[in-house]
Image (cartoon, helix red, strand yellow):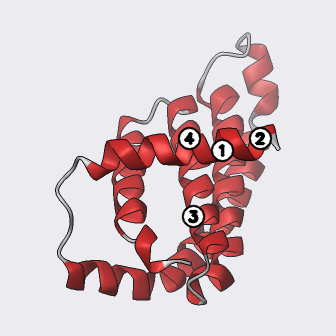
């Protein structure tokens, strides 16, 4: 029960932060809510395939990471690729819920963004962090469409 409360607290805190930003026009929010399930499905599939490929390539490079004292792109890259895989799977899991406008689908989108921003931080990707922050802004803009 404590985990649910802390998760709800995180969502409420972030919602408070993002509510201070200018809202999108109502018709934009409607369009975004309508295409979100399909975007989650497409990017979930692409993300799973890309992450699996990255994990395979980075695993192949693992012996070279050991030779370099664990330094280099591949050492953090494997962790980032696994986290990206988790975020992509969460997007796929969000598809039915977002299609049916259920809050459970919205929550899966939220957790996918959380994992995505962690993945970007692990990979030292400023662009990924900015992208995840934009993603949070958008999902909080459409939250009212989900019950």
Sort mark 3 into few (<14), some (14-19) or many (20+) by Cα contacts within 10 Å: many
- The residue lying at 44 percent from left, 79 percent from top is 145
Circle 2 residue = 3
Residue 55 location (% of width, % of height):
74, 49
Q: Which mark is residue 10?
A: 4
Q: Secondary structure at mark 1?
A: helix
Q: Please tell me which of labels 4 and 3 falls first in the chain.
A: 4
Q: Please tell me which of labels 3 and 2 falls first in the chain.
A: 2
- Left or right, residue 26 beside residue 49: left
Q: Secondary structure at mark 3?
A: helix
Q: Please tell me which of labels 3 and 1 falls first in the chain.
A: 1
Residue 8 location (% of width, % of height):
62, 48
Q: Are marks 4 and 2 in contact (CB under 8 Å)?
A: no
Residue 97 location (% of width, % of height):
65, 80
Report, in whole angstroms, how far the alpha carbon at label 4 lies from the one at label 3. 14 Å
- The residue lying at 71 percent from left, 38 percent from top is 78
Circle 3 residue = 109
- Foreground: disc 3 or disc 1: 1
- The residue lying at 65 percent from left, 16 percent from top is 71
Looking at the figure, which quarter contains the N terminus? top right
Report, in whole angstroms, how far the alpha carbon at label 2 lies from the one at label 1. 6 Å
Circle 1 residue = 7
For this orientation, the residue located farthest to the top is 69
Report, in whole angstroms, how far the alpha carbon at label 1 lies from the one at label 4. 5 Å
Sort mark 4 into few (<14), some (14-19) or many (20+) by Cα contacts within 10 Å: few
The answer to whether 136 is drawn above or below residue 145 in the figure is above
Report, in whole angstroms, how far the alpha carbon at label 4 lies from the one at label 2. 10 Å
């Amino acid at each position: 029960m404590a985990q649910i409360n802390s998760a709800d607290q995180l969502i409420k805190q972030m919602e408070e932060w993002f509510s201070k930003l200018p809202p999108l026009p109502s018709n934009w929010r409607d369009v975004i809510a309508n295409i979100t399930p399909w975007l989650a499905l497409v990017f979930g599939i692409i993300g799973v395939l890309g992450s699996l490929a990255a994990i395979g390539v980075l695993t192949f490079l693992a012996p070279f990471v050991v030779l370099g004292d664990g330094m280099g792109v591949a050492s953090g890259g494997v962790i980032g690729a696994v986290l990206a895989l988790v975020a992509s799977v969460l997007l796929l899991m969000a598809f039915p819920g977002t299609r049916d406008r259920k809050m459970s689908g919205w929550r899966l989108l939220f957790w996918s963004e959380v994992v995505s921003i962690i993945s970007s931080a692990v990979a030292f990707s400023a662009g990924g962090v900015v992208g995840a922050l934009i993603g949070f802004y958008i999902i909080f803009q459409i939250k009212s469409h989900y019950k």
